[in-house]
Amino acid sequence: MPQVYIGRCRSYEQAGVDAAIRQAVAALGGIERFVQPGQRIMLKPNLLLLKGPETAICTHPAIVQAVAAMVREAGAVPLIADSSGGGTSHNPRSLRSLYRISGMEQAAAASGAELNMDCEGLEVPCPEGGLVKMLDVMRPATQVDAIINLPKLKTHGLLRYTGAVKNLFGLVPGRVKLGYHTKLQDAARFSEMLLDIVLWARPALTIMDAIVGMDGDGPSAGRPKEMGLILAGEDCTALDLAALDIIGMDPATVPTMRAALSRGLTSGRAADLEILGERLGDVRVPDFDAPSHGSFDVTLIPPGIRRWLTNQFVARPHASGRCTGCGVCAENCPVGAISVENRRARMDLGHCIRCYCCHELCPQHAVELKRPPLVKLITRA
Ligand code: SF4
Ligand code: SF4
């Protein structure tokens, strides 16, 4: 029975976070179970955008600092590293801005962690992969002894939810991610690939920042949601299952969970988890909002009419009046479906594959996901 620890932590005040993380790791058997003296340990937060901790987009630096300090005390060297797709990890200069704005620079200084400056990627075999047998990963991930996964609990446009499993997509270098979106256009196949990354990375430990998560239109344009929780465990799928139970999202509606279920990696039932710390029934967040545009698995549509029906049924990206014409979405659209005209992004819906990278990466939160008129008519919403 996979173990998941759930602990309360009401704010990001450092002493409280330190105590909560220590309690979590102790409940799971102590840091020496996961980290050996002399090892190099990658700490993998979610550093999606150049945004500060108050936006709840990135893993909070207090969490990273607390974990890094424990890794140092265990005699190992912590390395903070992520490679987001939005142009923030392409070169040491952009990385320095990312670390400064996200608070990682301060977390590293306070804990003695190193900040990764290596932007290169490598192709590595993934023999256990169910879908992907060769993976592109950031080079530092191949040079450490273990990875500690530090996701943020948020909603997600394509996958409805992002947590332990999805956070490891950040190991794929920056814009190499676009190729994965192009090749694996539907959420089901994309989720299979994410599980392959988990199998390759095998994080020693995952500690999830759910002190303030994000609901609504995450992972960047949603609403910071105070939850006051830290989740921890070794099994990414189990951790996500517990998180979904807490936020009241049916695992059957989450593509990564459906993929894990079909591979036999989870039963899909939170009752099958061994919960340590707080009980699930005591920490549920009843008013956690799912993404407003709903979800629809395009693989359920016959291939011959998929494009037409996708346009009728699947939420469409649209640049709102907040658009500044910066072009980040156009640079990151995997199929080149975005142009910027008169300082406003235009999405070519005939070519759009509904990956929602534009929604995820827009620094102005200007990309809205609109339900097509037919869906509005059917659902009367
Ligand atoms: S939609 Fe967002 S990312 Fe795209 S051009 Fe407008 S502001 Fe920039
Ligand atoms: S327009 Fe947006 S949702 Fe459509 S393919 Fe491009 S990045 Fe993905």
Image (tube, rainbow, N blue to C red):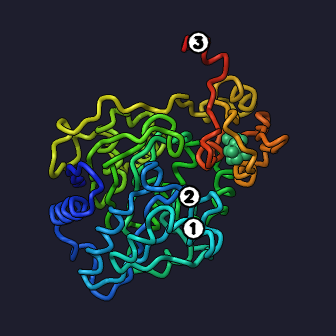
Label 1 or label 3, whichever comes before in sequence order: 1
- The label on residue 97 is 1
Residue 200 versus residue 129: which sits nearer the camera?
A: 200
On the rendering, which quadrant does ligand 1 occupy?
A: top right
Q: Position of residue 40 (x, y in %)?
A: 38, 82
Q: Position of residue 346 (x, y in %)?
A: 78, 38
Task: Give the residue pinned by disc 2.
Answer: 50
Does residue 69 sit above or below 240 in this rendering?
A: below
Does residue 301 sit above or below 262 in this rendering?
A: above
Does residue 30 sit above or below 20 in this rendering?
A: below
Find the distance from the CA under tag 2 to the CA under tag 3: 39 Å
Label 2 or label 3, whichever comes before in sequence order: 2
Q: Residue at x 36, y 83 (%)?
A: 77
Find the distance from the CA under tag 1 to the CA under tag 2: 7 Å
132 with respect to 65 (left or right): right
Residue 280 versus residue 267: which sits nearer the camera?
A: 280
Q: Position of residue 226 (x, y in %)?
A: 32, 41
For mark 2, does the 10 Å Cα neighbourhood hold few (<14), some (14 to 19), or many (20 or more) residues? Answer: many
Task: Give the residue pinned by disc 3.
Answer: 378
Q: Is mark 2 within 8 Å of ligand 1?
A: no
